[in-house]
Image (cartoon, helix red, strand yellow):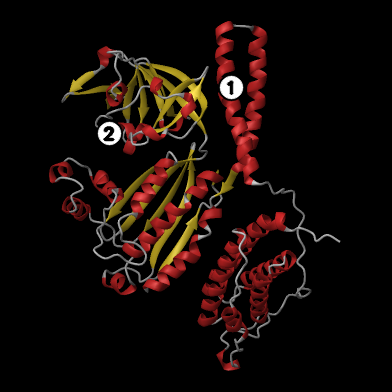
Amino acid sequence: MTDFDLSEFRDLFVEEGHNYLQTLNTNLLALERDPDDVQALEAMFRAAHSLKGGAATMGYSVVGDLAHATEDALDKLRRGRWHLTPPLTDLLFDVLDRLQALLADVAADREPTADTSMLERLRALKAPAPSELEVAPFPTPPGDEPGEPMAPPTSVVRVDVHYLDSLLDVVSEMVIHRSLLSRLGQRYELVALSDAIQVHDRLLTRLRNAVLGMRMVPVSQVFDRFPRMTRDLLKAQGKRAQFVIGGGRVEMDRSVLEALNDPLVHLIRNAIDHGLETPAERAKAAKSRTASLRLTARRERESVVIVLEDDGRGMDSVQIAAAAVEQGLITEEAVAEMSAGQILQLLCHPGFSTSREVTAVSGRGMGMTVVKRAVEALRGTLEIETQVGQGSTFRLRLPVMLTLLDAMLVRVGEEQYALPVAQVEHILEIEPARIECIGGKEVMMVDDAMLPLRRMSRLLHVPNADPNPRYALIVRPKGEAVGLRVDAVLGREEIVARPVPVALRSIPALVGATVIGEGQTVLILDVEEALGEPGITGFPSGRQVESSDL
């Protein structure tokens, strides 16, 4: 008889194992705060039991033995034979870390290595004396004896993410093809073709929405990883903080969300290491001995805004500027021309650091550089706010969907460019006679307010542009309205955003490229980055980028 090959189920086991460990970590944190939390303990027991069963089915005895010992310890807790003490809590966290490492071995197709010391530590635990019990034992709910948990009925089907990626690629190509069909319909004005294009457009929209819906996941899938990390870092540094998570149900494309894990880890570690004070320092500053650290998410139009804020020591922009000058990253003359927000962005300069010591958590000056680069690679922006003695706020603004982009197509000179619709408030058709020049800069009165104007042709150094562009896109970089003048507005179109070609990745404001119509390449700009540059040098025309490069 041929042995049954279970290797094809390995990925499923690893995925489920990670989910069980997340449940164990989350509920152990809850138990640490409230040892009377019966539901948290029961959830832990069920997760350990399921992990043990899955490991046994797959033949991973090392994982199964450790999960079984964990289940036994949790069963003693739920039956009141043991009491959750700080040493036991620390041991259970160590066990979960070990199980995480064993799952990593399984995922990498390595044989999990047994750790007899961990098993011995669990099995050597003794029940505390009756006098040590500080809380009443948990009575086991009737009918809740150990056994195989009943799986609730579900309509969810597991799909390999590679199939979702492939499906999105097909939809993306169809979006590009729709652009071609639309232009052919306009060119030839055939009624039958126009009707067919309308039907195709409706069907594609339904398919697009279905595919995007399958790819959307709640941010809690990443956020829920951080309470355990935060707890360990605070304990290691002797600090106290209430870590609050909000907006966990906000959804994003899974590829964007997964790419955010490392940047958020950097921000949280920096906040704990540099931002939060010790309890003694906070008491001396007339603050609560327990700090506040909040990680929240919210949806704004076609973007998701993720905010990390603390009530720690804050940062001094004067000190940051002085450190940047001392490290040779910028001149004193340049600093004098910078706003407070621009000075804070120096934190993201490679090699910048205000810490004179390299700690085990941070301090090498690379954390914020990594964050900014990762956010910009996702077509997002990073904003920093701070107040000395009051705390700091880091705000990440990111697209909900990375590949498909709702864009405004404009023409400057002979070139077309795409701008994210989410960054454009509205469009004005302006009369050159209404424009005034104040201090060498163009302005115009709009609704009894002075609107500064900037020419896109000058920002991008585009030749042969209209000397009197008649359209202005109203945008709000840094919260202040600006009119971005362009020669023509070609319309709104859903496009497929491709990565920036390697040769152009050093150019500011360029966040991607797309192909429209009959193969024309169009560059995608970040409006806020473009307006933040005094003049982008070396910006290429669209003809210099071939569609084969995308």
The image quadrant of residue 9 is: bottom right
| Mark 2 crowdedness (10 Å alpha carbons): few <14, some 14-19, many ≥20 | few
Earlier in the chain: of badge 2 and badge 1, it is 1
Residue 457 coordinates in the image, percent (x, y): 30, 21
Quarter occupied by the N terminus: bottom right
The numbered disc on residue 177 is 1
What residue is drawn where x is 49% and y is 24%?
515
Viewer-nearest residue: 65 or 294:
65
Q: Which residue sits furthest front?
A: 1
Residue 415 coordinates in the image, percent (x, y): 38, 18
Q: Which residue sits furthest left?
A: 333
Q: Is residue 306 above or below residue 69?
A: above
Question: Left or right: 260 with respect to 135?
Answer: left
Residue 174 coordinates in the image, percent (x, y): 61, 26
What residue is drawn where x is 37% and y is 36%?
505
Instruction: Determine whether the residue tagged by mark 1 lies in a helix, strand or loop.
Output: helix
Residue 164 coordinates in the image, percent (x, y): 63, 41
- Is residue 529 in view from this perspective? yes
- Is residue 30 in view from this perspective? no
Q: Are dots 2 and 1 in contact, CB under 8 Å?
A: no
Q: Is residue 478 above or below residue 357?
A: above
Viewer-nearest residue: 547 or 498:
547
Q: Is residue 326 above or below residue 115?
A: above
The numbered disc on residue 324 is none
| Mark 1 crowdedness (10 Å alpha carbons): few <14, some 14-19, many ≥20 | some
Q: Identify which amino acid the numbered label 2 is placed on.
A: Glu
Viewer-nearest residue: 500 or 482:
500
Q: Which residue is mark 2?
A: 533
CA distance separating discs 2 and 1? 35 Å
Question: Left or right: 143 with respect to 174?
Answer: right
Q: Identify which amino acid the numbered label 1 is placed on.
A: His
